């Protein structure tokens, strides 16, 4: 059996579950603009007229120099910030609807793990925050342990 890193198995499991639950996993971005205002009142344009279609089950990388808007775009898709104008659709829903329906999440570049918690307890934390009952968390945990071997 091929050995796969835990994070790769987790990513595959999450993607598999998402697309098994949703026939329409497309992300659509239309005429998206984002302008930040500094403390001094200056305007900084991060995104201008972004149009993008990402098909279900696609793997996409955003490449570009520092400050070109990659993180801003991801934060808008993940419903962490609102764009100045334009629209985003995630699986036919707004990012807010997708997030509230627990169909969307974001994994941050820098690991944010609590060293006093086990790996599984760290993975379980979002489920605790969402007030998922212990039994359901255990069911998901046993499913994950099958993926992790």
Image: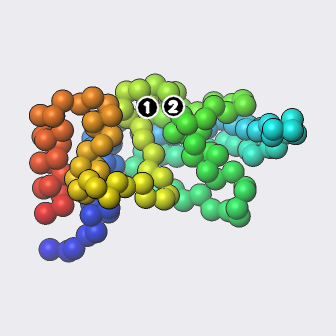
Residue 52, quarter of the rendered image: top right
The residue to which callout 2 is attached is 95
Identify the element where label 1 is drawn: helix
**What residue do we see at 33% from left, 34% from top?**
129
Q: Is residue 97 left or right of residue 65?
A: left
Counting the numbered discs, the total is: 2
In-front residue for pair 100/33: 100
In-front residue for pair 45/138: 138
Residue 115, quarter of the rendered image: bottom left
The residue to which callout 1 is attached is 99
- In which quadrant will I find the C terminus? bottom left
Q: Residues within 10 Å of mark 2 (few under 14, many from 20)?
A: many
Residue 37, quarter of the rendered image: top right
Is residue 3 in view?
A: yes
Is residue 12 in view?
A: no
Residue 3: x and y, percent? Answer: 21, 73
Q: Are marks 2 and 1 in contact (CB under 8 Å)?
A: yes
Identify the element where label 2 is drawn: helix
Residue 34: x and y, percent? Answer: 73, 38
Q: Which mark is residue 27?
A: none
Q: Name the outermost residue toward the front.
A: 116
Residue 70: x and y, percent? Answer: 64, 53
**What residue do we see at 27% from left, 36% from top?**
128
Q: Residues within 10 Å of mark 1 (few under 14, many from 20)?
A: some
Q: CA distance from mark 2 to mark 1?
A: 6 Å
Residue 57: x and y, percent? Answer: 40, 49
- In which quadrant will I find the N terminus? bottom left
**What residue do we see at 26% from left, 53% from top?**
117
Q: Is residue 4 above or below residue 122?
A: below
Q: Is residue 58 left or right of residue 80?
A: left
**What residue do we see at 54% from left, 59% from top?**
61
């Amino acid at each position: 059996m091929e050995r796969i890193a835990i994070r790769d198995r987790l990513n595959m499991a999450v993607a598999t579950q998402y697309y098994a639950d949703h026939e329409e996993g497309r992300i659509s971005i239309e005429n998206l603009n984002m302008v930040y205002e500094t403390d001094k009142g200056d305007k900084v344009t991060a995104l201008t007229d972004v149009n993008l279609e990402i098909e279900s089950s696609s793997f996409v990388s955003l490449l570009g120099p520092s400050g070109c808007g990659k993180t801003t775009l991801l934060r808008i898709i993940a419903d962490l910030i609102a764009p100045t104008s334009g629209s985003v659709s995630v699986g036919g829903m707004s990012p807010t609807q997708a997030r509230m329906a627990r169909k969307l999440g974001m994994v941050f570049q820098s690991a944010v793990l609590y060293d006093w918690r086990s790996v599984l307890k760290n993975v379980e934390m979002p489920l605790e925050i969402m007030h998922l009952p212990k039994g359901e968390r255990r069911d998901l945990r046993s499913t994950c342990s099958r993926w992790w071997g």
